[in-house]
Amino acid sequence: MLAQGSAKEMARVSGFIQEYPSDRQPGTERTDVYLGYDSASLYLVWVCWDSNPHAVRGHMTRRKAVTPPDDD
């Protein structure tokens, strides 16, 4: 885990473009991503803003089974 206060040193990425509903246009909702690392790990923090957060819904879906490759 990053040391306390390290978030201030993380690189911030923003200004994403969207693919849907309008391809190659600025995102309709703001998204900020913070990138950081130490000698053992890479850290990514996504901050996804929503103008109507009460409308956000989560759905559980069954995923396709993932099987390890045959190494014979």
Image (spheres, rainbow, N blue to C red):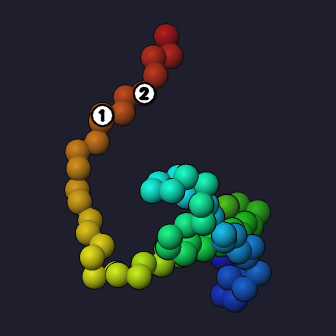
Amino acid carrying mark 2 in the image: Pro
Task: Judge whether 65 appears above or below 58 on screen.
Answer: above
- Report if the CB atoms under discs 1 and 2 are less than 8 Å apart: no
Amino acid carrying mark 1 in the image: Ala
Q: At x 54% / y 75%, what residue is drawn?
A: 30
In 3D space, how far apart are the residues under numbered discs 1 and 2 (Cα atoms)? 10 Å
Q: At x 23% / y 56%, what residue is drawn?
A: 60
Mark 1 nearby-residue class (10 Å; few <14, some 14–19, many ≥20) = few
Quadrant of res 46: bottom right
- Indicate the position of residue 66 as horizontal and vertical percent values: 36, 33
The circle drawn on residue 65 is 1
Helix or strand or loop: what does disc 2 sit on?
loop
Q: Nearer the viewer, mark 1 or mark 2?
A: 1
**Image position of 13 (left or right of 46):** right
**Image position of 53 (left or right of 25):** left
Q: Which residue is at the far top? A: 72
Q: At x 41% / y 82%, what residue is drawn?
A: 51
Which residue position is annotated with label 2? 68
Decide if residue 45 is in sight here.
no
Helix or strand or loop: what does disc 1 sit on?
loop
- Name the image quarter holding the N terminus: bottom right
Decide if residue 56 is in sight here.
yes
Quadrant of res 62: top left
Q: At x 75% / y 73%, what residue is drawn?
A: 11
